Amino acid sequence: MLSPAPKDTGFSTVQAAEILGMSHSFLLKILDNEALPSYEADGERRIRTEDLMDYKERLRNLEELTRETQEWGLGYTGE
């Protein structure tokens, strides 16, 4: 007999910040601005695995776009 898949308990904000490679305080600002969804469980803010991986992919795409823009000389020069 198959057992049901375990419920996704998500990640704590500390774990999520580490996975994303950013400070905990910066992640909290992102959550406060609702750029990354979160929920509360047992008095703790948590982030669903799917939402965290989607956000990580968005960051990766943005970094790639930024790198390519700079390589092509299309980036902001500050002048």
Image: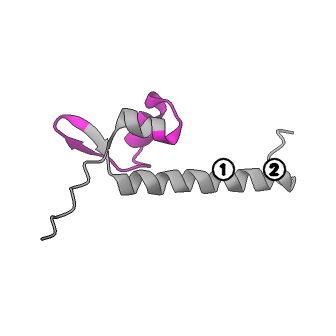
Along the line of sight, the residue nearer the viewer: 34 or 5: 5
Image quadrant in which the N terminus is located: bottom left
Quadrant of residue 15 within the rendered picture: top left
Which residue type carries mark 1?
Glu
* Residue that numbered label 1 is attached to: 63
Q: Disc 1 or 2, which lies upstream in sequence?
A: 1
Numbered disc 1: secondary structure: helix
**Height in image: 20 above or below 73?**
above
- State which quarter of the image contains the C terminus: top right
Find the residue positioned furthest to the bottom.
1
Say what amino acid the circle numbered 2 marks.
Gln
In the displayed image of the protein, which residue is found farthest to the left? 1
Place of residue 72 in the rendered image (x, y in percent of width and height, measured from the top left): 86, 56
Residue found 30% across the figure and 47% down from its top = 10
Q: Which residue is mark 2?
A: 70
Residue plotted at (32% across, 51% down): 48
What residue appears at the point 57 percent right and 50 percent down from the top-left corner?
A: 59
Residues rendered magenta in the picture: 19-44
Gap in angstroms between the C-alphas marked 1 and 2: 11 Å
Reply yes or no: does residue 21 show up in magenta: yes
Q: Neighbour class for label 1 at 10 Å: few (<14), some, many (≥20)?
A: few
Q: Which residue appears at 26% of the width and 53% of the height?
A: 8
